[in-house]
Image: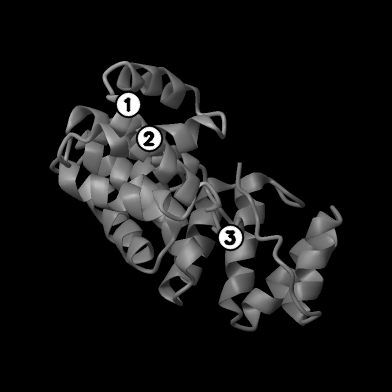
Amino acid sequence: MLSLDLSPRTETPLGAAIGHYERGDFAEALRLFATLAEEGDADATSWLGAMHANGEGVEASPARAFALYMEAAQAGIVLAQTNVGAMLCMGQGTPRDIPAGVLWLEKAAASGDLFAQYNLATLLSKGDGLPADPAAAAHWYRSAAERGHYPSQARLGFLYANGLGVAKDRVEAFTWLSLAAQHGVGTALTALEAVVAQMSSEEKQAGTAAVGRWRGRTADASRHARLNPVPG
C-alpha cells in the first residue's frame, strides 16, 4: 500500500491531476498523470508509479511502478528515491539488491526524507545485506525521531535503553519510548515499563520535562507516493 501527498496546492495541471486522485477518479487521474509524465514532469511520473504500485485505475504492476519510480528518482524526486531504495531492498518489482537500495536510501535520507531515514536505520540496525552499524542506525533513527516519526522514536528509545550504538541513558530512553507509546506503538510501552522501574526520581523528572519539550513535534513527512517501511 502506498500513500500520497495531500498537502495544499495551487490549481496547476499537476494539482488538477492530484485533485482527481483525491476524489477517487482514478481513471482521469491516471490519464492526466500519464500525459504530464510524457511531457517530462518528474512529480507526475512518481505519482504514476504510485498508481501502478497500488493498482489504482490500472492493474497493479510492481515492475512498472519500479521503472516509473526509478525515472523520477533519477530526475531528483526524493520520495521516488526512497521508494526505489525500499523496492530494491525488498526485491519488489525488481531483483533484490540491498547495496544498490542502500545507496538510494542514503541519498533520500541525506535530503531529509523521514521514511528513508527510518528504512536505512532499520537495515543498519539489523545488518541485513550490509554490515551492522548501530551508531549509524541511531543517528538516522534520531534524525527521524526528532521530527516526530513515531516508529523511529520507539527504536531510538530501545537503543538508549540497551546501549546499542549510543551510551546507555535511561532519561533518553524514557523520553523517546514515552513519545512513541503515546501514539500507540505497543512495543514502546512494554519497553518503557522496564526502563521506568530502573529510574531514580531525578531521572523521571528529567525525562518528563524532555517529553514535554518534544511532544509538540509531529511527523512532517509528505505522504506522496510512499512505500511501507522495509520490514524490520
Whole-number angstrom distance, CA of label 3 to CA of label 1: 39 Å
Quadrant containing the C terminus in the rendered view: top left
Q: Quadrant of residue 106?
A: bottom left
Q: Using the image, determine if residue 59 lies above or below residue 110.
A: above
Mark 1 in CB contact with mark 2 (< 8 angstroms): yes
Say which element carries label 1. helix
Give the structural element (helix, strand or loop) at label 2. Answer: helix
Is 29 located above or below residue 89 in the figure? below
Location of mark 1 (residue): 201
How many marks the image carries: the answer is 3
Q: Position of residue 182 (x, y in %)?
A: 55, 32
**Which of these two is toward me, 203 or 191?**
203
Q: Which residue, given by chain and number where applicable, does mark 3 sit on?
A: 222
- Kindly tell me whether residue 157 is visible in this rendering: yes
Graded by Cα atoms within 10 Å as few (under 14), some (14 to 19) or many (20 or more), the crowding at tag 2 reads: few
Query: Against 11, is 136 above or below?
Result: above
Asked if labels 2 and 3 touch by Cβ distance under 8 angstroms, the answer is no
Mark 1 to mark 2: distance in Å? 6 Å
Amino acid type at mark 2: Gln
- Of the pair 218 and 12, the residue shown nearer to us: 218
